[in-house]
Image (cartoon, rainbow, N blue to C red):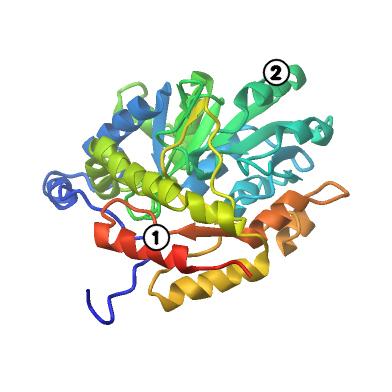
Amino acid sequence: MQDNPLPIPFNRPFVTGQETAYMTEAMTNGPLSGDGPFTKRASALLTEIVGATSALLTTSCTHALEMSAILLDLQPGDEVILPSFTFCSTANAYALRGAIPVFVDCRPDTLNIDERLIEAAITERTKAIVVVHYAGVACEMDAIGDLARRHGLVVIEDNAHGLGGFYHGQPLGSIGAMATQSFHETKNVHCGEGGALVFGDAEFHDRAEIIREKGTNRGQFFRGMVDKYRWIDVGSSYLPSDLLAAFLCAQLEEFKEIQAQRMAVWNHYHAELAGWAREQGVTQPTVPADRVHPAHLYYLLLPDLDNRQAMLAHLKERGVQATFHYQPLHSAPAGVQYGRAPEEGCPVTDATADRLLRLPLFAGLRPEELTRITEAVLEFRVR
């Protein structure tokens, strides 16, 4: 072992080896703009993995969320229920349409939106419930679906973490009316920056295609369904280049291998750190028996903020780049301005944000790196 080994990054974007060949093929044959052969191929691969009715690639998961907000026909003052413990894009998409993000606390076990608190947040202005499958562990979708049906609400899955996960045998991303995917470089499969909107309910697809193409029926024109394309609806430029789709194809084709590598790392952490976690009062991830997670991330919940910060510093000194995660949206400046939270706030979210630490997890993590990370964690003692 070197005296000063190289630091281990939190993430190292994985490449299969086929990305360059596919991008070269796209550049050689064209077109370079979206909806070329690789866009169609990647969409088909994604639809198969998710088990959805259809999928549209987008330039980011954020843009897919924005498309879902347009599809809901939100008006100023309408409300959308979502967790406080998520990335700001989940709330931004609906706030941009003038809707009010209504924040709900998370469960202390899975860190997902607490389905027991959702009904109290529903009003006559509520239009949708957005769930985020944190770490790829499914939310309580049966209970949430029942709530949505009783109140006439649309369920949208922010599935940025969940590609490859299952709830009661059903793939995440195929349960709600719509689901958004992320292909950011930190995700299980990626194209640097990218996303998708996938549909469990086919009724949204045709309009979504128009919204994604700047509000025009360009797609229908190229399929010979109309003699010219026109401005039909509101929309924006949410369609990625076929170059990005070519990169993504290489990743999606190797999805099973990528998942196997990530799962091996996740399982190693979970087994090797179990005894240490019990002794130190540290909580490991909770995965209910009726769910399958996709090894998107591995986190530890330290007893408090001071210990979390101390462990981050400890790992950094040993050349391991760990990090924290989401900061509560309900108390963020924009959350206070644009959203609404319960009078009692979201105390589980607050505590989770202070205590959570994520370890490096990516396909291609070398055995010696995994050993170094594990040994560094085991050296830490809670104060």
Q: Nearer the viewer, residue 117 or 7?
A: 7
Amino acid carrying label 2: it is Arg
| Residue drawn at the location 39% of the way across and 64% of the way down | 375
Amino acid carrying label 1: it is Thr
Q: Is residue 142 above or below residue 118?
A: above
Judged left or right of residue 317, residue 6 is left
Label 1 crowd bin: few (<14), some (14–19), many (20+), radius 10 Å = some
Can residue 329 be seen here?
no
Give whichever of discs 1 and 2 has the lower sequence position.
2
Can residue 298 be seen here?
yes
Q: Is residue 158 above or below residue 206?
A: below
Residue with the mark numbered 1: 374
As helix, strand or loop, the secondary structure at mark 2 comes to: helix
Which marked residue is nearer to the observer: mark 1 or mark 2?
Answer: 1
Residue with the mark numbered 2: 149
Locate the N terminus and report the quarter of the image it occupies.
bottom left
Give me the disc on residue 75.
Answer: none
Judged left or right of residue 289, residue 33 is left
CA–CA distance in space, label 1 to label 2: 45 Å
Q: Is residue 250 above or below residue 228?
A: below
Label 2 crowd bin: few (<14), some (14–19), many (20+), radius 10 Å = few
